């Protein structure tokens, strides 16, 4: 009971994540810009002359690589801010492509945890849910504590042990509430543009996808990415306090 009482509440998690993101936006601006560029280009492909499916595939690969790098940069910056330190200049004012190994480590442990979750889903769903909660901290363990492979997975499970449902509930809140907010924002913006262009009647149908609706989704998704990562870092940091 003591451990649960000291775990950050779901409401505080959302608020503190929002405060860090908005008050220190400059710390996350660089990776955001580099993630935004290919994401916007993909959304604009329908109106770019000469664009092909090969162009989209290439941009998708580039976007995935940049997003991995950006995730590591954002996590590093968020952890520094959580500890009360200003993020290093290399995290906020330069590309900092040097620490490629950290990005590779992050990708490997994320894939490993993802594979275990998928295998768990195949084992009648419930194990997948359990694995998802047990191993959600593994990528952060790799970046922040320096553990790799099964060591990171074991440490993540250790952080969850004895408070499975309290932490699962915080992950649910962290993902559901901001996602619902994004859906509302995208729907309102898209509906406003559709009304202005006289396409409101067809906007909410499956056949109404347009380059501008894709653009709205791409921009809002990229802007939201740091928030989810920041919240993950804060939850991880709070879970570490009692372990």
Image (cartoon, rainbow, N blue to C red):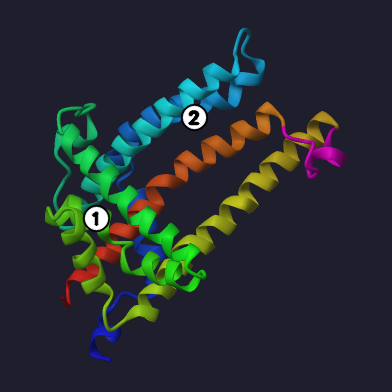
Image coordinates for residue 96, horizontal then vertical, percent: 19, 29
Image coordinates for residue 173, horizontal then vertical, percent: 47, 68
Q: Which residue lies furthest to the top in this view?
A: 50
Quick one: label 1, few (<14), some, or many (20+) residues within 10 Å? many
**Vertically, is 229 above or below 158?**
above
**Vertically, is 104 above or below 171?**
above
- Helix or strand or loop: what does disc 1 sit on? helix
- Residue at 58% across, 27% down: 43
Give residue 25's quadrant in the image: top left
Using the image, tell me which numbered label, if any, was put on residue 101. none
Residue underneath mark 2 = 39
- Residue at 54% across, 17% down: 54
Image coordinates for residue 233, horizontal then vertical, percent: 28, 58
Q: In this view, does 209 lie to the left or right of 239?
A: right
Counting residues from the start of the chain, the first of labels 2 and 1 encountered is 2
Kindly tell me whether residue 19 is visible in this rendering.
no
In the image, which residues are magenta? Answer: 199-209
**Vertically, is 120 above or below 197?**
below
- Helix or strand or loop: what does disc 2 sit on? helix
The N terminus - image quarter: bottom left
Give residue 168's quadrant in the image: bottom left
């Amino acid at each position: 009971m003591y451990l649960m009482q000291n775990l950050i509440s779901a409401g505080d998690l959302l608020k503190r994540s929002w405060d860090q993101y908005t008050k220190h936006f400059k710390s996350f601006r660089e990776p955001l810009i580099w993630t935004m560029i290919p994401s916007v280009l993909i959304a604009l492909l329908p109106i770019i002359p000469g664009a092909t499916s090969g162009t989209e595939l290439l941009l998708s690969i580039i976007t995935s690589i940049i997003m991995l790098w950006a995730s590591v940069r954002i996590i590093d910056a968020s952890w520094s801010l959580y500890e009360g330190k200003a993020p290093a200049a290399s995290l906020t004012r330069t590309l900092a492509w040097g620490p490629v190994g950290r990005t590779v480590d992050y990708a490997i442990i994320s894939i490993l945890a993802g594979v275990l979750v998928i295998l768990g889903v195949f084992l009648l769903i419930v194990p997948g849910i359990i694995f998802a909660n047990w191993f959600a901290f593994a990528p952060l363990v790799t970046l922040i504590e320096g553990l790799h492979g099964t060591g990171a997975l074991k440490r993540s499970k250790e952080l969850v042990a004895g408070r499975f449902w309290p932490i699962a509930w915080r992950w649910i809140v962290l993902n559901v509430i901001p996602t619902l907010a994004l859906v509302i924002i995208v729907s309102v913006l898209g509906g406003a543009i559709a009304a202005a262009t006289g396409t409101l009647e067809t906007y909410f149908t499956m056949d109404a996808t347009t380059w501008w609706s894709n653009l709205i989704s791409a921009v809002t998704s990229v802007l939201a990415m740091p928030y989810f990562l920041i919240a993950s870092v804060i939850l991880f940091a709070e879970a570490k306090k009692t372990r």
